[in-house]
Image: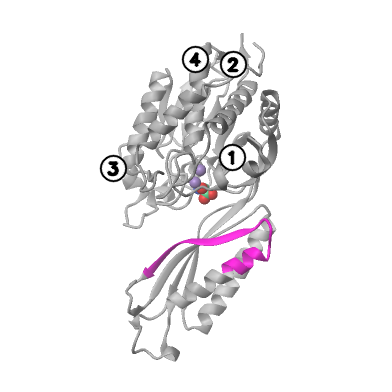
Amino acid sequence: MALESNLRIDGARLWDSLMEMAQIGPGLRGGNNRQALTAEDGEGRALFQKWCEQAGLEMGLDQMGTMFAKRPGTDPDALPVYVGSHLDTQPTGGKYDGILGVLGGLELIRTLNDLDIKTKHPIVVVNWTNEEGTRFAPAMMASGVFAGQFTQDWAYSREDADGVTMGEALENIGWRGEETVGKRKMHAMFELHIEQGPILENEGKEIGVVTHGQGLKWMQITITGTESHTGSTPMPMRKNAGLGMARITTLVDDIALSHAPNAVGAIGHCDVYPNSRNIIPGKVVFTVDFRSPDLAVLEDMEARLRAGAKEICDTNGLGLEIEIVGGFDPITFDEGCVSAVRNAAARLGYGHRDLVSGAGHDACWINAVAPTSMIMCPCVDGLSHNEDEEISVEWATAGTDVLLHAVLETAQIVD
Ligand code: HGY
Ligand code: MN
Ligand code: MN
Protein backbone atom coordinates (compact mmCIF):
# COMPACT_ATOMS: atom_id res chain seq x y z
CA MET A 1 0.00 0.00 0.00
CA ALA A 2 1.49 3.31 -1.08
CA LEU A 3 1.35 6.40 1.08
CA GLU A 4 -1.43 8.35 -0.62
CA SER A 5 -2.42 11.92 0.18
CA ASN A 6 -5.97 10.73 1.02
CA LEU A 7 -4.64 8.75 3.98
CA ARG A 8 -5.68 10.99 6.89
CA ILE A 9 -6.49 10.78 10.58
CA ASP A 10 -9.91 11.48 12.12
CA GLY A 11 -9.58 15.08 13.30
CA ALA A 12 -12.96 15.14 15.08
CA ARG A 13 -12.04 12.07 17.14
CA LEU A 14 -8.65 13.62 18.00
CA TRP A 15 -10.34 16.85 19.05
CA ASP A 16 -12.85 14.99 21.26
CA SER A 17 -9.95 13.25 23.03
CA LEU A 18 -8.11 16.55 23.53
CA MET A 19 -11.23 18.12 25.03
CA GLU A 20 -11.91 15.12 27.29
CA MET A 21 -8.30 15.12 28.57
CA ALA A 22 -8.60 18.89 29.16
CA GLN A 23 -11.34 18.22 31.75
CA ILE A 24 -8.70 16.66 34.04
CA GLY A 25 -6.79 19.15 36.19
CA PRO A 26 -8.67 22.25 34.94
CA GLY A 27 -7.02 25.64 35.39
CA LEU A 28 -8.77 28.75 36.67
CA ARG A 29 -9.23 30.32 33.20
CA GLY A 30 -10.01 27.47 30.81
CA GLY A 31 -6.52 25.96 30.59
CA ASN A 32 -4.96 23.19 32.66
CA ASN A 33 -3.09 22.75 35.93
CA ARG A 34 -2.00 19.10 35.72
CA GLN A 35 1.50 19.38 37.17
CA ALA A 36 3.83 16.41 37.13
CA LEU A 37 3.07 13.64 39.66
CA THR A 38 0.03 15.32 41.17
CA ALA A 39 -3.23 13.43 41.61
CA GLU A 40 -4.48 15.17 38.45
CA ASP A 41 -1.46 13.88 36.52
CA GLY A 42 -2.37 10.42 37.80
CA GLU A 43 -5.94 10.83 36.52
CA GLY A 44 -4.70 11.94 33.10
CA ARG A 45 -2.40 8.93 32.96
CA ALA A 46 -5.28 6.59 33.82
CA LEU A 47 -7.45 8.03 31.05
CA PHE A 48 -4.61 7.73 28.53
CA GLN A 49 -3.99 4.11 29.62
CA LYS A 50 -7.70 3.29 29.26
CA TRP A 51 -7.72 4.65 25.71
CA CYS A 52 -4.52 2.78 24.83
CA GLU A 53 -5.94 -0.50 26.12
CA GLN A 54 -9.14 0.10 24.14
CA ALA A 55 -6.90 0.48 21.07
CA GLY A 56 -5.33 -2.91 21.83
CA LEU A 57 -1.92 -1.53 22.82
CA GLU A 58 0.49 -3.33 25.16
CA MET A 59 1.35 -1.03 28.10
CA GLY A 60 4.83 -0.52 29.58
CA LEU A 61 5.89 1.69 32.53
CA ASP A 62 9.47 2.47 33.52
CA GLN A 63 11.04 3.49 36.84
CA MET A 64 10.60 7.17 36.04
CA GLY A 65 6.91 6.64 35.41
CA THR A 66 7.17 7.10 31.65
CA MET A 67 4.33 5.28 29.86
CA PHE A 68 4.83 3.25 26.66
CA ALA A 69 1.90 1.92 24.60
CA LYS A 70 2.99 -0.52 21.88
CA ARG A 71 1.29 -1.60 18.65
CA PRO A 72 3.08 -4.71 17.32
CA GLY A 73 4.77 -4.73 13.91
CA THR A 74 5.00 -7.68 11.53
CA ASP A 75 8.73 -8.03 12.28
CA PRO A 76 9.16 -8.67 16.02
CA ASP A 77 12.91 -8.02 15.71
CA ALA A 78 12.47 -4.59 14.15
CA LEU A 79 13.08 -1.69 16.54
CA PRO A 80 9.93 0.35 17.17
CA VAL A 81 9.17 3.82 15.88
CA TYR A 82 8.25 6.01 18.87
CA VAL A 83 5.81 8.90 18.89
CA GLY A 84 4.74 10.97 21.86
CA SER A 85 5.30 13.91 24.15
CA HIS A 86 3.99 14.76 27.65
CA LEU A 87 0.67 15.00 29.54
CA ASP A 88 1.96 17.11 32.44
CA THR A 89 1.27 20.84 32.27
CA GLN A 90 2.40 24.16 33.67
CA PRO A 91 0.39 25.48 36.68
CA THR A 92 -1.30 27.90 34.28
CA GLY A 93 -0.84 25.76 31.20
CA GLY A 94 -2.80 25.25 28.04
CA LYS A 95 -4.77 22.24 26.77
CA TYR A 96 -2.37 21.36 23.94
CA ASP A 97 1.29 21.81 25.05
CA GLY A 98 2.53 18.20 25.09
CA ILE A 99 -0.97 16.74 25.09
CA LEU A 100 -1.33 17.12 21.31
CA GLY A 101 1.79 15.00 20.80
CA VAL A 102 0.58 12.18 23.05
CA LEU A 103 -3.04 12.11 21.83
CA GLY A 104 -1.93 12.71 18.23
CA GLY A 105 0.15 9.54 18.59
CA LEU A 106 -2.92 7.71 19.93
CA GLU A 107 -5.02 9.00 17.01
CA LEU A 108 -2.37 7.68 14.62
CA ILE A 109 -2.83 4.23 16.18
CA ARG A 110 -6.62 4.48 16.06
CA THR A 111 -6.40 5.34 12.34
CA LEU A 112 -4.10 2.38 11.59
CA ASN A 113 -6.52 0.11 13.48
CA ASP A 114 -9.53 1.48 11.55
CA LEU A 115 -7.79 0.86 8.22
CA ASP A 116 -6.16 -2.40 9.35
CA ILE A 117 -2.78 -1.09 8.22
CA LYS A 118 0.16 -3.23 9.28
CA THR A 119 3.73 -1.94 9.65
CA LYS A 120 7.04 -3.78 9.70
CA HIS A 121 8.29 -1.85 12.73
CA PRO A 122 6.19 -1.74 15.92
CA ILE A 123 4.89 1.72 16.87
CA VAL A 124 5.02 2.96 20.48
CA VAL A 125 3.16 5.97 21.90
CA VAL A 126 4.99 7.63 24.83
CA ASN A 127 3.95 9.87 27.72
CA TRP A 128 7.25 11.18 29.17
CA THR A 129 7.15 12.00 32.88
CA ASN A 130 7.76 15.59 34.01
CA GLU A 131 8.58 17.33 30.75
CA GLU A 132 7.70 20.77 32.12
CA GLY A 133 10.13 20.89 35.02
CA THR A 134 7.92 23.40 36.79
CA ARG A 135 7.26 21.42 39.99
CA PHE A 136 10.50 19.42 39.84
CA ALA A 137 13.41 20.99 37.93
CA PRO A 138 14.86 20.33 35.41
CA ALA A 139 12.52 20.22 32.45
CA MET A 140 12.47 17.09 30.25
CA MET A 141 13.48 15.11 33.33
CA ALA A 142 12.39 11.54 32.45
CA SER A 143 13.54 11.76 28.84
CA GLY A 144 16.82 13.13 30.20
CA VAL A 145 17.27 10.09 32.44
CA PHE A 146 16.28 7.84 29.51
CA ALA A 147 18.98 9.49 27.36
CA GLY A 148 21.61 9.19 30.10
CA GLN A 149 21.80 12.93 30.80
CA PHE A 150 20.77 12.64 34.48
CA THR A 151 21.03 9.72 36.91
CA GLN A 152 17.75 8.28 38.17
CA ASP A 153 18.84 8.80 41.78
CA TRP A 154 19.52 12.49 41.15
CA ALA A 155 16.14 12.86 39.45
CA TYR A 156 14.39 11.09 42.36
CA SER A 157 16.07 13.50 44.80
CA ARG A 158 14.78 16.69 43.16
CA GLU A 159 12.43 18.53 45.49
CA ASP A 160 9.33 20.65 44.91
CA ALA A 161 8.56 23.88 46.80
CA ASP A 162 7.13 21.83 49.70
CA GLY A 163 10.23 19.63 50.01
CA VAL A 164 8.54 16.58 48.47
CA THR A 165 11.01 14.64 46.33
CA MET A 166 10.21 13.51 42.81
CA GLY A 167 10.72 9.88 43.86
CA GLU A 168 8.22 10.22 46.74
CA ALA A 169 5.66 11.95 44.51
CA LEU A 170 5.99 9.21 41.88
CA GLU A 171 5.40 6.51 44.53
CA ASN A 172 2.52 8.48 46.04
CA ILE A 173 0.53 8.54 42.79
CA GLY A 174 1.33 4.87 42.15
CA TRP A 175 2.89 5.32 38.71
CA ARG A 176 6.43 4.07 39.34
CA GLY A 177 7.06 1.11 37.03
CA GLU A 178 9.65 -1.64 37.23
CA GLU A 179 11.15 -1.30 33.72
CA THR A 180 14.74 -0.08 33.64
CA VAL A 181 14.87 3.44 32.23
CA GLY A 182 16.62 3.70 28.87
CA LYS A 183 16.77 0.00 28.08
CA ARG A 184 14.37 0.42 25.15
CA LYS A 185 16.06 0.87 21.77
CA MET A 186 14.36 3.01 19.15
CA HIS A 187 14.36 2.90 15.35
CA ALA A 188 13.29 6.57 15.41
CA MET A 189 11.18 9.03 17.38
CA PHE A 190 8.82 11.76 16.15
CA GLU A 191 7.31 14.38 18.48
CA LEU A 192 4.30 16.44 17.39
CA HIS A 193 4.02 19.71 19.33
CA ILE A 194 2.44 23.14 19.08
CA GLU A 195 4.98 25.80 18.03
CA GLN A 196 4.56 27.95 21.15
CA GLY A 197 5.67 30.90 19.00
CA PRO A 198 4.16 33.15 16.28
CA ILE A 199 6.04 32.17 13.10
CA LEU A 200 3.74 29.56 11.53
CA GLU A 201 0.54 31.51 12.15
CA ASN A 202 2.11 34.76 10.89
CA GLU A 203 3.27 33.04 7.69
CA GLY A 204 0.02 31.12 7.19
CA LYS A 205 1.81 27.76 7.34
CA GLU A 206 0.21 24.65 8.90
CA ILE A 207 3.44 22.71 9.52
CA GLY A 208 6.83 23.45 11.05
CA VAL A 209 9.55 21.02 9.90
CA VAL A 210 11.76 21.23 12.96
CA THR A 211 15.44 20.98 11.98
CA HIS A 212 17.05 22.22 15.22
CA GLY A 213 16.30 22.96 18.86
CA GLN A 214 17.84 25.93 20.65
CA GLY A 215 19.95 25.31 23.75
CA LEU A 216 18.89 26.26 27.28
CA LYS A 217 20.53 27.18 30.60
CA TRP A 218 18.61 27.41 33.90
CA MET A 219 20.69 29.06 36.65
CA GLN A 220 19.17 29.18 40.12
CA ILE A 221 20.51 32.23 41.97
CA THR A 222 20.38 32.68 45.77
CA ILE A 223 21.15 36.15 47.10
CA THR A 224 21.51 36.67 50.86
CA GLY A 225 21.34 40.05 52.61
CA THR A 226 19.96 41.12 56.00
CA GLU A 227 16.30 41.20 57.01
CA SER A 228 15.58 44.55 58.67
CA HIS A 229 12.85 47.14 59.12
CA THR A 230 11.82 48.89 55.89
CA GLY A 231 11.10 52.07 57.84
CA SER A 232 13.81 52.55 60.42
CA THR A 233 16.86 51.13 58.61
CA PRO A 234 18.89 53.96 56.97
CA MET A 235 19.41 53.35 53.22
CA PRO A 236 23.25 53.12 53.43
CA MET A 237 22.94 50.38 56.05
CA ARG A 238 20.69 48.10 54.03
CA LYS A 239 21.71 44.71 52.61
CA ASN A 240 18.68 44.35 50.37
CA ALA A 241 18.57 40.96 48.58
CA GLY A 242 15.53 42.17 46.65
CA LEU A 243 17.57 45.02 45.19
CA GLY A 244 20.17 42.51 44.04
CA MET A 245 17.50 40.49 42.23
CA ALA A 246 16.06 43.62 40.61
CA ARG A 247 19.49 44.68 39.27
CA ILE A 248 20.19 41.15 38.01
CA THR A 249 16.77 41.01 36.34
CA THR A 250 17.66 44.00 34.15
CA LEU A 251 21.14 42.53 33.56
CA VAL A 252 19.53 39.33 32.18
CA ASP A 253 17.43 41.40 29.78
CA ASP A 254 20.44 43.47 28.64
CA ILE A 255 22.57 40.36 28.03
CA ALA A 256 19.84 38.64 25.98
CA LEU A 257 19.14 41.77 23.93
CA SER A 258 22.86 42.16 23.22
CA HIS A 259 22.54 38.90 21.24
CA ALA A 260 19.37 39.84 19.36
CA PRO A 261 17.42 38.54 17.47
CA ASN A 262 17.81 34.87 18.50
CA ALA A 263 18.90 34.83 22.13
CA VAL A 264 16.29 35.13 24.88
CA GLY A 265 16.43 35.52 28.65
CA ALA A 266 14.00 35.98 31.53
CA ILE A 267 13.34 35.18 35.18
CA GLY A 268 10.09 33.27 35.58
CA HIS A 269 10.41 31.96 39.13
CA CYS A 270 11.34 33.87 42.29
CA ASP A 271 10.87 33.37 46.03
CA VAL A 272 11.39 36.35 48.36
CA TYR A 273 12.04 35.76 52.08
CA PRO A 274 10.41 36.57 54.39
CA ASN A 275 8.13 38.25 51.83
CA SER A 276 6.66 40.71 54.34
CA ARG A 277 5.64 44.21 53.29
CA ASN A 278 7.76 45.92 55.94
CA ILE A 279 10.85 43.71 56.05
CA ILE A 280 13.79 44.24 53.73
CA PRO A 281 14.25 40.86 51.96
CA GLY A 282 17.07 38.92 53.60
CA LYS A 283 17.09 36.26 50.89
CA VAL A 284 15.79 35.78 47.37
CA VAL A 285 15.94 32.62 45.25
CA PHE A 286 15.18 32.90 41.52
CA THR A 287 15.88 31.09 38.24
CA VAL A 288 17.40 32.68 35.13
CA ASP A 289 16.27 31.05 31.84
CA PHE A 290 18.72 31.77 28.97
CA ARG A 291 18.26 30.24 25.48
CA SER A 292 19.99 30.47 22.12
CA PRO A 293 20.49 28.31 19.01
CA ASP A 294 24.21 29.14 19.28
CA LEU A 295 26.30 27.39 21.97
CA ALA A 296 28.94 30.14 22.05
CA VAL A 297 26.20 32.71 22.74
CA LEU A 298 24.77 30.57 25.56
CA GLU A 299 28.21 30.33 27.14
CA ASP A 300 28.82 34.07 26.74
CA MET A 301 25.47 34.83 28.40
CA GLU A 302 26.32 32.60 31.36
CA ALA A 303 29.80 34.11 31.77
CA ARG A 304 28.50 37.69 31.65
CA LEU A 305 25.71 36.90 34.08
CA ARG A 306 28.15 35.37 36.57
CA ALA A 307 30.50 38.37 36.35
CA GLY A 308 27.70 40.94 36.48
CA ALA A 309 25.85 39.27 39.36
CA LYS A 310 29.08 39.11 41.39
CA GLU A 311 29.71 42.83 40.83
CA ILE A 312 26.13 43.72 41.84
CA CYS A 313 26.31 41.62 44.99
CA ASP A 314 29.82 42.77 45.98
CA THR A 315 28.76 46.40 45.55
CA ASN A 316 25.69 45.91 47.76
CA GLY A 317 27.24 43.69 50.45
CA LEU A 318 25.20 40.65 49.38
CA GLY A 319 26.01 36.94 49.33
CA LEU A 320 25.68 35.14 45.98
CA GLU A 321 25.29 31.48 45.00
CA ILE A 322 24.63 30.29 41.45
CA GLU A 323 23.60 26.67 40.72
CA ILE A 324 22.93 25.22 37.25
CA VAL A 325 19.54 23.48 37.60
CA GLY A 326 18.88 22.65 33.96
CA GLY A 327 20.36 22.90 30.52
CA PHE A 328 21.17 21.34 27.21
CA ASP A 329 23.22 22.37 24.19
CA PRO A 330 21.58 23.39 20.89
CA ILE A 331 20.65 20.28 18.91
CA THR A 332 20.39 19.28 15.23
CA PHE A 333 17.66 16.75 14.47
CA ASP A 334 18.20 13.68 12.28
CA GLU A 335 18.23 14.48 8.55
CA GLY A 336 16.33 11.30 7.62
CA CYS A 337 13.55 11.99 10.11
CA VAL A 338 13.41 15.66 9.09
CA SER A 339 13.03 14.60 5.45
CA ALA A 340 10.22 12.19 6.34
CA VAL A 341 8.38 15.11 7.95
CA ARG A 342 9.03 17.44 5.00
CA ASN A 343 7.96 14.76 2.47
CA ALA A 344 4.79 14.14 4.46
CA ALA A 345 3.82 17.81 4.57
CA ALA A 346 4.45 18.15 0.83
CA ARG A 347 2.53 14.96 -0.05
CA LEU A 348 -0.44 16.11 2.03
CA GLY A 349 -0.37 19.59 0.53
CA TYR A 350 0.18 21.45 3.80
CA GLY A 351 2.07 24.76 3.79
CA HIS A 352 5.32 24.14 5.64
CA ARG A 353 8.66 25.70 6.51
CA ASP A 354 11.79 24.71 8.39
CA LEU A 355 11.82 25.83 12.00
CA VAL A 356 14.15 25.98 15.00
CA SER A 357 12.32 25.00 18.19
CA GLY A 358 12.36 27.84 20.73
CA ALA A 359 11.10 25.62 23.54
CA GLY A 360 12.76 22.52 24.91
CA HIS A 361 11.13 19.15 24.29
CA ASP A 362 11.65 15.50 25.16
CA ALA A 363 12.73 15.01 21.54
CA CYS A 364 15.77 17.23 22.29
CA TRP A 365 17.11 14.58 24.68
CA ILE A 366 15.95 11.53 22.72
CA ASN A 367 17.84 12.95 19.73
CA ALA A 368 21.00 11.91 21.62
CA VAL A 369 20.06 8.20 21.55
CA ALA A 370 17.90 7.72 18.43
CA PRO A 371 17.16 9.38 15.07
CA THR A 372 14.60 12.03 16.04
CA SER A 373 12.71 15.00 14.69
CA MET A 374 9.65 17.10 15.44
CA ILE A 375 6.53 18.32 13.72
CA MET A 376 4.97 21.62 14.81
CA CYS A 377 1.58 23.15 14.21
CA PRO A 378 0.66 26.82 14.80
CA CYS A 379 -0.95 28.17 17.96
CA VAL A 380 -3.06 31.33 18.19
CA ASP A 381 -0.91 34.46 18.63
CA GLY A 382 2.02 32.12 19.33
CA LEU A 383 0.80 32.00 22.93
CA SER A 384 1.70 29.09 25.23
CA HIS A 385 2.42 28.50 28.93
CA ASN A 386 -0.76 30.54 29.32
CA GLU A 387 -4.31 29.28 29.92
CA ASP A 388 -5.41 31.12 26.78
CA GLU A 389 -3.24 28.78 24.63
CA GLU A 390 -5.39 27.86 21.61
CA ILE A 391 -5.12 25.93 18.36
CA SER A 392 -7.68 24.94 15.73
CA VAL A 393 -8.94 21.45 14.93
CA GLU A 394 -7.57 22.00 11.42
CA TRP A 395 -4.06 22.70 12.75
CA ALA A 396 -4.25 19.71 15.12
CA THR A 397 -5.41 17.54 12.21
CA ALA A 398 -2.69 18.78 9.85
CA GLY A 399 0.02 18.08 12.41
CA THR A 400 -1.29 14.61 13.12
CA ASP A 401 -1.73 13.79 9.43
CA VAL A 402 1.95 14.66 8.93
CA LEU A 403 2.87 12.58 11.98
CA LEU A 404 0.95 9.63 10.49
CA HIS A 405 2.73 9.87 7.14
CA ALA A 406 6.22 10.47 8.59
CA VAL A 407 5.79 7.47 10.90
CA LEU A 408 4.44 5.22 8.13
CA GLU A 409 7.32 6.19 5.83
CA THR A 410 9.70 5.18 8.66
CA ALA A 411 7.85 2.15 10.08
CA GLN A 412 7.14 0.79 6.56
CA ILE A 413 3.63 -0.33 5.60
CA VAL A 414 3.32 -4.09 4.99
CA ASP A 415 0.78 -5.18 2.36
O1 HGY B 1 10.89 24.99 29.09
C1 HGY B 1 10.58 24.48 28.02
O2 HGY B 1 11.06 24.86 26.98
C2 HGY B 1 9.55 23.38 27.97
O3 HGY B 1 8.28 23.98 27.87
N1 HGY B 1 9.60 22.53 29.13
MN1 MN C 1 5.77 20.88 25.84
MN1 MN D 1 5.68 23.47 28.08
Regarding mark 1 in the picture, which secondary structure is present there?
A: loop
**Quarter-wise, where is residue 170 in the image?**
top left
Judge by depth and name the residue closer to the eye, 304 or 231: 231
Q: Which stretch is magenta?
A: 252-272
- Choose the circle earlier in sequence order: 2 or 1: 2
Mark 2 or mark 1, which is nearer to you? 1
Residue position marked by numbered label 3 in the rendering:
172
Residue that carries the numbered disc 4 in the rendered image: 113
* Label number found at residue 120: 2
Vertical order, 45 against 244 (above or below): above
Between the residue at mark 4 and the residue at mark 2, the CA separation in whole angstroms equals 15 Å
Crowding around mark 4 (Cα neighbors within 10 Å: few <14, some 14 to 19, many 20+) is some
Q: Residue at x 35, y 83 (%)?
A: 230
Q: Is mark 3 on a helix, strand or loop?
A: helix
Between marks 3 and 1 in the image, the one whose residue lies nearer the viewer: 1
| Marks 3 and 1, the one that precedes in the sequence | 3
Residue at the outermost top position: 415
How crowded is the residue under tag 2: few (<14 C-alpha within 10 Å), some, or many (20+)? many
Q: Position of residue 309 (x, y in %)?
A: 55, 73
Decide whether residue 128 is among the magenta residues.
no
Question: Is residue 256 found inside the magenta-colored segment of the image?
Answer: yes
Q: Which of 368 and 216 is in front in this view?
A: 216
Residue 378: assigned label = 1
Q: Which of marks 4 and 1 is nearer the N terminus?
A: 4
Q: Where is residue 60 in the image (x, y as percent from the top left)?
A: 41, 28
